[in-house]
Image (cartoon, helix red, strand yellow):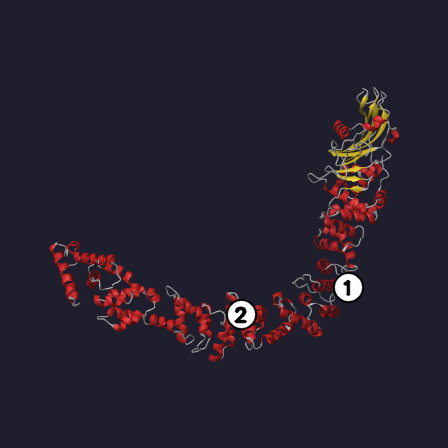
Amino acid sequence: MSDGFETLIYTDCRPGQGLQGSPGLQFQARSPDADPEAMKLVQSTLLYESPTSWMGQGRPVGSYPRSLAHVVDRYYATGAGVYLGREANGAREGNQLTHAVVTTDPDAYGAVRPAQLFGAPFWTTEPAPTTHCDPLGDDDWEPGPLDASRVQELVRTTPGGRDLLTALLSALQRLPEPNAPRVLFVCDDPLPVLGWITAGTLLLPQRQALGVSFKVFTTRPSYAVAQVLAVHPDWNRQHPTVANDQGYVVIDLTRNEWTPVAPTASASLWAGLFCTGDPYDVVDAVEVGVTLGLPDEQTVPVVAAAVLGRQPEPEHVLPLVRWLRDGPAEQLRSYGGGVADLLTRDVTGLPAAALGVLDEVALAGHRTDPGSPVWGADRVAAIRQALLAAELHVAVTGGASGSDRVPRLPEPLWTARHRREGQRRLAETLASAAPSGFEAALRVARRFELAAPIRDVPAAARAFVLDWADHPEHGYDPALWPDDGILADLCRDELRHRAAGSPQAAQTIADAWWPILEPRLQTVETDLDRAVLSAAVLHLPAPRRRELVHQFLRGALVDARSSAGLVGVLFARSPANPDEWELLLQEVPPRTPLPPDVFRSLRAALLDADLLPQRELKMCRQLRKRGLFVPDQPLAQLLDAVESLPDLTRELARATRRNRILSATLAVLPPNVVRTYADDLRTALLDNRRPDVVVDLLAELPGLVPAYLDQLCESTRRPGQVWHAVTAFLIGTDARTLPKLGRAKRSELGRAGQRWLARANERQVAAATELVRDLERRELTARWEEHVTTAKERGWLGRLWHRSR
């Protein structure tokens, strides 16, 4: 129960007639609790505005229209005005009376929209007998003639009325938005203006409608604070027009035209319901919609179905069934049964997407309440059948279909009779479907756990297979069809026929079809089988490729001949990788020479490497030893060199005379073998005590010379190895040794020999001298002895050695 309204009367007063006591325009009377703040609001926003142009013309008082205005600013205030003509205290025009009601309680209006107060019988057009007027209680008033039926008739009889109502409601719904345009009516009669404002606000929830301020009429719209305004076309010729709206949404009722307004999500729906249904039920539905808390596009279909019993349009079914599935339990208890019953009476024409959700809701509803007439077995089955029909239709007309299986319906919801009906529908669809629709219908069949009736539709199946074989780019995946494999087998037979006798055609087909054909490949018998297997190994990612290779190696190898052939097919287009070399060692019988191309990446890894990769080297040696890989001459020479390396290093360290065979062996040693095993070769040469032999061997190993000489210089810093000093002396002083050696390096070796003499004792020098003489080169011996003599004369000999003791 509300507190009702306080009342105020504003007009021109005689002395002592108004609240101020003095003559002039003022509040003439008020109810006891009408406070000054409410009076200020009424005075600033609701007073009747007298047109100066008409007053100057002396128009009859009766020609002036009545006014109605409403405002909200802490108070809800509505005021009705009338023009009275001459002032109470003189002969001038401009007297008017505004009767206003104010409240802080929105419930005081009940379900009435403020515009419906136009013409209400409680309005007065005369001053009160005293400065006191009574408040307006809940039982003391009733609205004017603008009820829902009358404004519905106004909308219906206005040409384009439904469109106008949609535009007006859209504008009203947007008023709370920042910078939303205000609405401005142009009309010479307040009744139709307030009729349209009533129609628009009846389609807003009551609390929202109370927040819409309006003023009918105003002489200065740019100064008015109301959101909805009306101007009289004869009062001001400069008012906004549809052609020049000046930022307003202009509705010109004199010309029946209005500013175009983009409709909101719900405005056209509400307008349609209002024009075609019981207007009072529609207003009730508006208030119910507020309680749902749904988005606009869902609210109208839900309340139209739940409150009005209206069958929804197809585009509104999906929001409805989503609400049935996801809506709050309290709403569903109140309105869900009616909506569900309305939707499930006849589901044959519902869209597939909506049926998919409704199918979920129906199954859940039956499980919760199996005795419900809404979710009975017949209706649940009918929904499933309609869903199947709708998805098949979508499939064959080019739409997408889901891949997840629909939940299985238990007996007795889904009987053998239902399954037969589903199979019949599927067969009819497939028989008349184009190839793309045929495939999409198969995906629907799997989704509903239906068998593919391929033998019942041979012509359509043949057309599909031929089209599929022509267009592998369609990317069909048989895993998404019912799992009987008939179509895949038919397609494989067609492709084998096309590939027969032409390896090139087989490879072209395999490159396009291997993802489809490889999973069903069990044996390798035809050109196409071989091409598919090679293409799969070429294209598969590494883990899946290894599985495939292992599968065929383990399951198909019988003898050496068949093994070599199968391995050749596997790696015809992509050589084996390191993981697959391991598989070959494990699975292929020994002494089965495999095609060289299988190992071309292994060969390249060894022959092209700067340093030999040890994993590949080890694997190659094992494959060769097992008889699976017969290397060509360059690779065989490399492997032989590696295998003979231990014997070679021992021979290098022990050689005491020049050996042409040994030199020849070194000359053909692959450079990357020398680089890989440089430390072993250098150590062996450093261990050799015959300088002349070492020099000859180094000549065959030019790549080893820089590192060997660096180590030799380092060794001469310690006088222990006499032969190192002699070797350094020999190379440093004889230009015929290692002729490509630069002068700087020879000088460094000469200085190294002198440093050695400075450190060596007499016994070491004597041993070195004997080693030089054994070289049997008199000029070299003489040069050495000269060095020794110079060292003795200068006192170098053994000096550092003695100091070090």
Quadrant into which the C terminus falls:
bottom left
Q: What residue is disc 2 on? A: 535
Mark nearer the N terminus (2 vs 1) = 1
Q: Position of residue 214 (x, y in %)?
A: 77, 36
Residue type, numbered disc 1: Asp
Image side of residue 108 versus residue 518, left or right: right
Quadrant into which the N terminus falls:
top right
Q: How crowded is mark 1: few (under 14 residues within 10 Å), some or many (20 or more)?
A: some
Q: In this view, does 774 lie above or below 175?
A: below
Q: Residues within 10 Å of mark 2 (few under 14, many from 20)?
A: many
Q: What residue is disc 1 on? A: 378
Q: Position of residue 281 (x, y in %)?
A: 82, 47
Q: Do the residues labelled 2 and 1 touch (CB within 8 Å)?
A: no
Q: How far apart are marks 2 and 1 (CA)?
A: 53 Å
Residue type, numbered disc 2: Ala
Query: Is there any visible trace of residue 111 in the rendered image?
Result: no
Q: Nearer the viewer, mark 2 or mark 1?
A: 2
Query: Is there any visible trace of residue 346 in the rendered image?
Result: yes
Q: Quadrant of residue 100?
A: top right
Image side of residue 597 versus residue 173, left or right: left
Q: Where is residue 369 in the image (x, y as percent from the top left)?
A: 74, 59
Residue under the image location 82 percent in, 47 percent down = 275
Q: Is residue 755 above or below residue 531?
A: above
Element assignment for label 2 = helix
Q: Position of residue 17 (x, y in %)?
A: 84, 22
Element assignment for label 1 = helix
Q: Is residue 476 above or below residue 146?
A: below
Image side of residue 583 versus residue 663, left or right: right
Q: Which of 120 and 441 is in front in this view?
A: 441
Q: Nearer the viewer, residue 503 or 38?
A: 503
Q: Which of 349 and 656 is in front in this view?
A: 656
